[in-house]
Image (cartoon, helix red, strand yellow):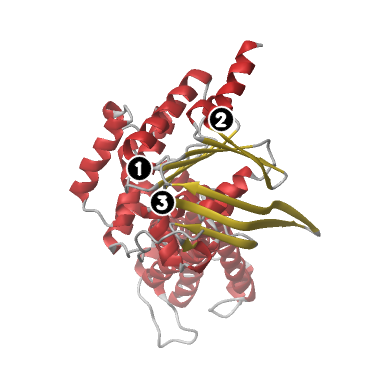
Amino acid sequence: MQQQTRGTIGQQIELPFMESVRISFQSLMIRFGRSVITTAGITLGIAFLVSVLVNNEVTVAMKESGSKQEITTLEEEEAPGITMKDKWLIIMSLIVCVVGIANSMLMAVTERFQEIGTMKCLGALDRFVVRLFLLESGFQGLAGALIGALIGCFGSLLLGLKDYGLDLFFYFPLLPVLDEQPARFGVLLIILAGCVLGMILSVIGAAFPAWRAAKLPPAEAMRTEV
Amino acid sequence: MADVVVKTEKVVKEYRMGTNVLRALDGIDLEILSGEYISLMGPSGSGKSTLFNMIGALDLPTAGKVFIDGQDMGQLSQSQIAWFRCHRVGYIFQSYNLLHVMTALENVTLPMIFAGLSTSERRDKGAELLEKVGLGERTHHRPDELSGGQRQRVAIARAFANGPSIILADEPTANLDTVIGREIIDLIKELNVDQGVTVISATHDLKMLDVSDRIVDIRDGLVERIRNRDEIEIQVGEVGGH
């Protein structure tokens, strides 16, 4: 026996963008404690990176200023600019930052697989689920990175004050000096770059697991245990 | 005779576990009529939850076909499946699956957001549904502020959000005590009768027996037997008499 068709199946509608923004923001705010922990991962990564970069800028600026009376390390003998050790530190901090953020976001999304499966049961399209997580991770990344960049910058500032005293304020490399070799980016640009990097990394870190979960049949997503 | 709402044709589902293949469903043929209250019964690992997932388009069969309202589920696009889950089916789960960041009302209105209802429509309809399941006073409580029975009531209200024709309930009473479980069963039955929706429930709760129109016993991935309510009542009586 073949059944008769009662009503056809429609196409699921797209949701307004603002609705996604509202839901993702609300979701972040309500699980504030968990969000803070995830965000802390981003904050620490970016704080480390920014502090290394700012420290570097400060050292170069102070060397060039000729204010060497306070410098007692071996670096004194070296030409101004980024040393091998600095390069190594920057690369390390970048790796720590990338891995830390990716790990935070991966955990945060994986523990919500059941939620993703449930949303799909209720009629959410895959791309809606992914968009929700991208927005959430974007907010989180921006907030975490901004705080991290400021903390990192402040830390380097304190370190610089200890090393160079108040002279630091006269020569503080706030703005970029691009016509020099090697180019100096200045603290403001470093903070901005830190924010952008933190946001991009956390969005990428969230996108992969969110996309994978959204593609799964809901039954499988809900079965997945963390 | 009532319309056939769900029809499965030789549905097979296999899970791959390393090098082993586990055949959870071994060719299920089943027809479910509109307005029926069906219980899929069987021990753990019998395949009843897998069958439940196939009927609800929550997972795809390895072979065979599932028709709902005459539509072959395997032929639908992603967007059509999402529409189908949103409008045609209401899901109730053993562990409620409420979003714990949302209030009862927000949980109930979430499927309405996916259906494109306006904010005021959602609020009114959500409040009405919560009233209907006896939670009119608790619309702004979050799931962790509700008891298990109340959470399941929210889940039931959510399942009815977009006026579905089929309710799929996966072990809806497994996490509840006998009294609360009974209340939940009665509520589902009441909605089944009032709204004429088809209820398909995977369960091993014997309390489900006397509200079910038919019981489908699943064993080792096959339909072992199908019993009608009158046969069941005799059996329940026998059990009670011992």
Identify the residue position indicated by label 1 in the image: B160
Q: Is residue A110 visible?
A: no
Query: Is label 1 in contact with label 2 (beta carbons under 8 Å)?
Result: no
* First along the sequence among labels 1 and 2: 1
Q: Residue furthest left?
A: B120
Identify the residue position indicated by label 3 in the image: A122
Provide the chain ID for the residue under circle 3. A
Dot 2 crowding, Cα within 10 Å, few <14, some 14–19, many 20+? some
Type of the residue with mark 1: Phe
Q: Residue at x 48, y 29 (%)?
A: B211
Image coords of residue B143 (percent x, y): 41, 33
- Residue A100 image label: none
Viewer-nearest residue: A203 or A95: A203
Viewer-nearest residue: A54 or B234: B234
Q: CA distance from mark 3 to mark 2?
A: 22 Å
Q: CA distance from mark 1 to mark 3?
A: 11 Å
Image coords of residue B131 (percent x, y): 27, 31
Dot 1 crowding, Cα within 10 Å, few <14, some 14–19, many 20+? many
Type of the residue with mark 3: Leu
Identify the residue position indicated by label 2 in the image: B174
Provide the chain ID for the residue under circle 2. B
Q: Residue at x 48, y 87 (%)?
A: A181
Viewer-nearest residue: A55 or B66: B66
